[in-house]
Image: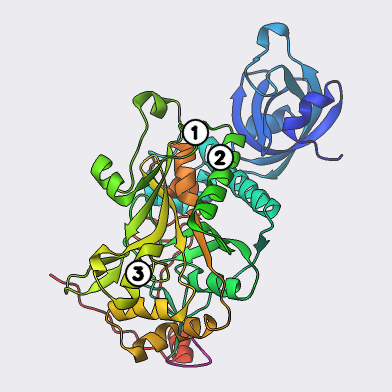
Amino acid sequence: MERTYIGELGQHVGETITIKGWVSVRRDQGKMVFFDLRDMTGTVQGLVLPSNPAIEIAKGLKVESAVAITGAVNKRPEKNVQADKLNGDIELLIESIDILNLSETLPFEINGDTSGINEEVRLQYRYLDLRSERMQRNIRLRSQFVQKCREYLFKQKFTEIETPLLTESTPEGSRDFVVPSRLQPGKFYALPQSPQQYKQLLMVGAFERYFQIARALRDEDLRADRGFEHTQIDIEMSFVEQGDIMGMIEEMMIETVESLGFTIKEKPFPRLTYAESMEKYGADKFDMRTEEDRANNVLAYAWVYKFPFFEKTPEGGWTFTHNPFSMPIPEHVDMLLKKENVGDILTTQYDLVCNGFETGGGSIRAHKPELLKSVYEIMGYTDEETEERIGHMLEAFKYGAPTHGGIALGVERVLMNLTNEEYLREVQAFPMTRGGQTAVMKAPKELTPEQLIELGLRVEKKEKKA
């Protein structure tokens, strides 16, 4: 018999159907056995009568077993109707049970909120944790958010383009994860901290409007809202100014999150300069919500812009605050080219903040070689070092590179806002532990001697500091 989804059972009252899913709850009443059964679309109560041959199977069936169940969809007695629940007015009179895979006793309960369970145990059995109602809701909401953003961008004439995962080390401000080359021993690829250079090269390549649901990898210190891996909605546009990008992204976020049922505190989003945000909030990531807003899960979005381009290094030199590929604001272009009043130069960087998190960041980009070269000179790079790092960008910008800019929205940060979760791992399917251990699988781990020989590598272990 063809499978019927549990969420559609209300359309099949009086019919005999087959559902497939998991046993959430089993209640043995002596003569009768009741079940709560679920699939990805919902939950329904089923019962097995004592006269049914399936009663012996029902009594031995463990929760979380995968089953195929055939039965008649009946209306519940009026006194038993649960009007506030999906399928609260129907039940399944079970005729047969086919055990597809009998479950052993679970290492922890998944019927409630699993966030209080030991992190290492949760991630060791992440596939079970993902069955919990909260995790199902979070991951499905993540999918819906990405889908709606993707649909919006297609309507705005964007092209979705994938960029390489194996690339070269780039000056993005964090440590790279590196991959040894087997074919070229002693040389290494780097995993992308972002698709920054590739998306700018796509603008040179005349695609004009690009986006990608991009994976980004950074060897950073782990914290509640940051991991080694994250996903970003990566966007770049040609022939635009700062206001064009901010306006379009604002429209996308409003359309997307409101369609998901969320309330935005203020529209249009407030716009504060970096100086104003520091003066008013003491930070460039701030929370504008009241206590009532927090209780109602209101989203308080705002833009912060006109950031300082450079900041002092511990050694007394200069480094970028956000991105070396940014443009200064128009009135500071000459200061950048002349390398004067470096600490006063402001950039076209803009950050989207929400409820105390930075959820996105971007800028108008440098599109002329002399601008980008001047940034690297201010940071103390020689001509040779600059050529080695970004010579391909300087070359590309010689060939009619358009004015362009973009933004990257952090999917996990957005979802933390939408779900009120405090930890990034609660909105990722397979996150890492705080110690950098992968979920379920045992990485990082040592390579075999044969692998090391093939890659031309030798491992020298560091002595731990006392």
Q: Which residue is mark 2?
A: 254
Looking at the image, is mark 3 or mark 1 nearer the viewer? Answer: 1
N-terminal of the pair, mark 2 or mark 1, is: 2
| Count of residue discs | 3
Crowdedness of circle 3 by 10 Å Cα count: few (<14), some, many (20+)?
some
Between residue 446 and residue 234, name the one nearer to us: 234
Residue at the left extreme of this rendering: 466
The magenta stretch spans residue 182 = yes
Residue 346: image x %, image y %?
A: 33, 61
Q: Which mark is residue 45?
A: none
Q: Are marks 2 and 1 in contact (CB under 8 Å)?
A: yes
Q: Quick check: 18 left or right of 396?
A: right
The magenta stretch spans residue 107 = no
Placement of 365 over or under 24, stated as above or below: below
Report if residue 112 is visible in the image: yes
Name the amino acid, label 2.
Answer: Ile
Q: Which residue is mark 3?
A: 173
Q: Which residue is mark 1?
A: 264
- Residues drawn in magenta: 180-186
N-terminal of the pair, mark 3 or mark 1, is: 3
Placement of 53 over or under 328, stated as above or below: above
